[in-house]
Structures are given as structure tokens and as C-alpha cells.
Image: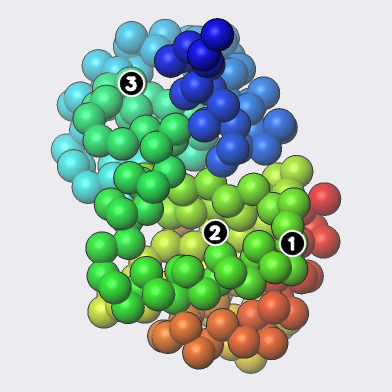
Amino acid sequence: MGVSGGKAKKAAANSVLTERQQKWFASVEASLERDTGKSIVEWVKIAKKCPETAPRKRAQWFRDKYGLGVNRIAHIVSVAFPGGPSWDEPDALLDQLWKEKDGRAIYEAVVKLVRKEFPEAVIGPRKTFVSFSRKVQFAGILPSKVGKAEIGLPLPVSASKRLEPMKRRPWAEKHSGLLVLYSPKDVDAEVKRLLTLAWAKGA
């Protein structure tokens, strides 16, 4: 007997979420009303009144105005605006996120390094970034302007001369260091060292 559509989707989704993340996302809606006093239906109504339309700006609006965390924001927005690929369509999410070939080449170089050095890492494409997780997220990468890429790391800026202070990102609550990559050649021994430090923090 073949796998049903629902089970197939769940299996696909599980490949981009850690076990801890799976349990968390299963509890998001259940705890949302309890903690905020508003049901998912009420939050969807609020989302549809948001003046921002770009995903990043919309997420920042929710965070600034209501103090919501990234996972709850992602859930509310996905229910309010179901269009576009979902988390169980990682390839479609990657194609949507990494439209510039130069940025995509940097991303692929980072993924190659992560898969080689940290084979247990869970690589999870999202609508606005890609997460790298152990038990928790230890890094996140997203495209930047003109074919660049940015990696967020839970490391102090003092850990490397190449790190900059982390910009405000709705998904980067625990990341304090920002690493800007300009080409695949930048994915070098220093990037490996920094990812190794971050990997240790993701245990």
C-alpha cells in the first residue's frame, strides 16, 4: 500500500525540521490563544490588516507591534496568506528565495560545507531564509543585495574580524553575529571555523 498524501507531506516536512522543531510547531496554535488571549482566527484578521506586504517587513511589523516570536508569526501568516510554497516544498522555497544565480551559488557552497562537516544538520528552507539546525538553530542564511548572502550566527562579533553586528531579523533572535559572503570563494576555512563554533552551541 502506498503512502497517503497526508503522510507523504508529513514525511517531507519532517526532513526540514528537527524533532524539537516538529513538536514546537505542533504546539504553536494550541498555545497561541492561551498565551495571547486571541485565537488563530483573530490573529488572521489582524494579519490581513497589516500595512506591510513584503514577508520580512510583515514579520517585523508583527514583532514590533505585538511582540510575537518568529514561529508564531510564521504560523499566523501561513494561515492568513496560504499562497506560495509551504515548508513541505523545500525545492520550491529555495527557488523562490534564491532567484539570483550568484547568491544561489554562495548558498550551495555553504550547504556543501554544512553537509560535509555536520551531516546530522537539518537544513530547513523557509520563505525568507534557510535555517541550519542541530537541536536548535545554529545558523541561518538569506540572500542579500546584488548576489551576496548573509549568515546569522549565535556568536559574538569578537569571534572573527569578518563578523558584523547582527541586523534586526525576525528569525535571528539568538544570533548576534552577521557574516556577509560575496562569492562562493568566501566559504573558506574561517567560515568552517565559525560554523563549527555555532554548531557546538546548537546542541
Q: Distance between the residues labelled 3 and 1?
A: 33 Å
Q: What element carries label 2?
A: strand
Q: Can residue 150 be seen in this view?
A: no
Residue lying at 52% horizontally and 31% vertically, measured from the top left: 13
The earlier-in-sequence mark between 1 and 2 is 1
Which amino acid, by three-letter code, is at mark 3? Val
The earlier-in-sequence mark between 3 and 1 is 3
Q: Is residue 203 above or below residue 178?
A: above
Between 46 and 20, the residue placed more toward the observer is: 20
What residue does disc 3 label? 79
Q: Residue 118 carries which label?
A: 1
From the viewer's perspective, is the residue at label 1 or at label 2 nearer? 1
Q: In this view, does 68 lie above or below 201?
A: above
Question: Badge 3: few (under 14), some or many (20 or more) residues near its Cα, within 10 Å?
Answer: some
Q: How far apart are marks 1 and 2 (CA)?
A: 15 Å
Q: Where is residue 137 in the image (x, y as percent from the top left)?
A: 65, 50
Which amino acid, by three-letter code, is at mark 2? Gly
What residue does disc 2 label? 140
Question: Badge 1: few (under 14), some or many (20 or more) residues near its Cα, within 10 Å?
Answer: some
The earlier-in-sequence mark between 3 and 2 is 3
